[in-house]
Image (tube, rainbow, N blue to C red):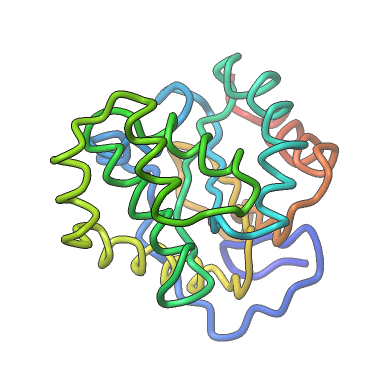
Amino acid sequence: MTMTGLRVVLPVVLCGLLWPLFLWAADTTEADERVRGRASAPLTLIEYSDFTCGYCLKFFKDTWPRIHARYVETGKVRFLYRDYPRADQGPGIDAAMAARCAGEQGKYWTMHDRLFAEGGRLHSTVYVEHAAAIGLNRSAFDRCVKEGRYAKSIFEDRQEANRWGFRGTPGFILVRTNNEPTEKEPAVAIPGAFPFEMFAEEIDRLLASSPQ
């Protein structure tokens, strides 16, 4: 299934899709800690996710380790994480805020991985325990969380996911790192926690046709 600038590998309703500002421009790796992999990787995979989502946890446990080992660590794919809280308040927002605030101290991915490892059992005590365990400056972390410093950015991520056509989590976009999608070569939308083989098929297809 294709639309202008978007290839959907599985059926999904995409109504009124508006293109977001592309994230693989030069400013992607600025102060944003939510990037894994080399900036020079030919492909970029963007995940829109919620720390309380069971299917997001399934991707984290079953599929992400294989993508990381085969494609990210080998320099073939750069991975970006984006927040898609399913509710406007509650543990999904709180967990996203805790990870963002840990990122201020260079520990975004450490907190991210610990929160997913909780398997959805998230509450304020958990964030405090993990902050202490990973050596965060507690006063700075607590102040960041209390202020809701990243609330606007978190909801902007969700709006961006909606513009891609996603209405649930997780959702993934696969693109060439240095090229905007076109009708001839659209972005690939993977709307769900599908098996590793689905991701590998699409990644390998794009890598095989990458300019040498």
Direction from residue 206 to residue 101 in the image, left or right: left
Q: Quadrant of residue 49?
A: bottom right
Pick the front one: 18 or 132: 132
Query: Which residue shows up at 29% across the image and 24% down it?
Result: 135
Query: In this rendering, would 194 be left or right of 101?
Result: right
Q: Quadrant of residue 64?
A: top right
Label count reads 0
Q: In the picture provided, is 200 more to the left or to the right than 27? A: right
Q: Quadrant of residue 141?
A: top left
Q: Quadrant of the C terminus?
A: top right
Quadrant that contains the N terminus: bottom right
**Residue drawn 52% across and 54% down?**
122
In the figure, 155 relative to 36: above or below? below
Q: Nearer the viewer, residue 39 or 86?
A: 86
Image coords of residue 59 (percent x, y): 71, 44
Q: Position of residue 78 (x, y in %)?
A: 51, 31
Residue extending farthest top: 74
Q: Image check: 113 left or right of 6?
A: left
x and y percent of residue 106 in the render? 28, 28
- Name above or below for residue 95 compared with residue 210: below
Q: Residue furthest bottom?
A: 16
Q: Residue at x 41, y 74 (%)?
A: 89
Residue 98 % position (x, y) = 35, 48
Q: Residue at x 20, y 37 (%)?
A: 138
